[in-house]
Image (cartoon, rainbow, N blue to C red):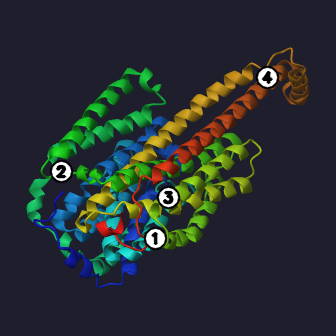
Amino acid sequence: MAAATASPTLAVQDQWRPATNPWLIAAVVALAAFMEVLDTSIANVALPHIAGSLGASEDQSTWVLTAYLVANAIVLPMGGWAASVIGRKRFFMLCIIIFTVSSFLCGIANTLPLLLLFRVFQGAGGGGLQPMAQAIMADSFEPSKRGLAFSLYGLVAVLAPSIGPTLGGWITDNYSWNWIFYINIPVGILALILTDRLVEDPPWNKADKSNFFRIDYIGLALLTISMGTLQVMLDKGEEKDWFGSGFIRTFGIIFVATFVALIIHEWYAKSPLMDLKLFKSRNFAVCCFLMLLTGGLLNATTVLQPQFLQTNLGYTATIAGLSLSGGGIALVIVMPFAGQAVSRFPARNLIAFGFFCFALAYYLTATKLSLLLSFSTASWLRVIQMVAIPFVFISVTTAAYFGLPREKSNQISGLINFVRNIGGSILISLTSAEVTERGQFHQNQLLKHLSMSNPNLQNELAALKGVFGGSAGGANASQLAHGSIYNQLQQQSQALAYVDVFYLLCAASVLMIPMAFLLKKNKPGEGSGEIAVH
């Protein structure tokens, strides 16, 4: 979205510096972004409690997540237009206000429809926080220090989803689900006050109220419909047997039609909601694809590991969430080193290294997953998985700006965050569906070996009948023994399904290694201008 009548000169861009220490600015905007990213995962473990409290089914309670994601995805690309109308700082503060007030309303909601309505408001407010925080950081630091600054933003973006399940489980178990929303209120107030005092708009991002009437209404409508239908497909696909259902096929057709129409319209529109011509830059296009998968890997594994521990090993939500906390500690340690590495090594080399680490981590996870997995092993596996994140996330975020003018910061950050969120939604749904399908496959395979003529099965049944016979009586002992064998078979099938999914994630990571070398080789320590890439 064009925000100003004329592009700023390179001289103005190079000379301008914020009056406040840029690291203070980075800390303030990162605080607000952390609050928003945390809310995308903190509610996951509380869904059964929310459903029980509001008289809804667990299936209906999933809309608490979907409503937020839909609103979030729609607002993300609108950040550039909104910032051009009222200024980036004011838009950022408005988003904090909407998010904080909506958090309070979510906490006091006493019916599911009200909670869903307030989650839509909360998602709309949160959708502007991430891209604006990233754009503010990009403009506050000189190009040679931008990689290190993005390490702080990267820490926020990947640490918050890691601790979200742990914090959400602890709050829900010890207080109530309402408090997962109330905790945003003091953080939001603090972020609002600090933003007002420390953040300022650069000269090329000043407000222009005349841009209010330049919003791309057609693009907004197509974006809303396409993202809404996509989220419904992802949320209900597994339940409805995907494209075996007429309901899903209908939504699929609507999604494809509106998404294609959105691309065509945005490409030719004079004042587009999303500046798709940025994809003419090979660097930016490749970075968006890499970030799509990075967001997917991070979010999918954040769901898969605690899900495995809860459903197969009987962990509580709090303990399962704690298994991810070691990864958060690893991020705190590794993130600064990754930020420094961006100023020393070409971004594409670091991205390739990061995806190699991803592949190795998922391979190790696949080989270690079993029904005998210990808490310590699960924690270490998460640590290994998270080591790769900083190298990929910071490098991709930094490389996305190479060769593009600084007045495009809002659009760049909006689109990068948009694809990361969409990647997370897609891979969460696909991996969850794959766990179910592979579980059924392995169950059928294992059943072939459960022949009554098998002496091992006969011995196991006899032993179980002896165990159950004393307490349940002889008549029920046989049924209980067979039931126990079947439960073991289901657990083994599910464990093998998770192993298969992590092998698939490993293969996907390997395929991304050569993709990284489609990026232009930048000179480490230099900025985003054309001179920085060759």
Q: Nearer the viewer, mark 4 or mark 2?
A: 2
Return the residue at label 3.
351
Q: Position of residue 461 (x, y in %)?
A: 86, 23
The amino acid pointed to by label 4 is His
Cβ–Cβ under 8 Å for marks 4 and 2: no
Q: CA distance from mark 1 to mark 4?
A: 54 Å
Give the class, few, some or many, for how many residues have Cα within 10 Å of label 4's Cα (few <14, many ≥20). Answer: some
Return the residue at label 2.
272
Residue drawn at 23 percent across, 69 percent down:
90
In the picture shown, does residue 294 fall above or below 234?
below
Return the residue at label 4.
482
Q: CA distance from mark 2 to mark 1?
A: 31 Å
The amino acid pointed to by label 2 is Pro
Q: Is residue 430 visible?
A: yes
Viewer-proximal residue, 531 or 85?
531
Q: Position of residue 493 (x, y in %)?
A: 69, 31
Q: Earlier in the sequence, mark 4 or mark 2?
A: 2
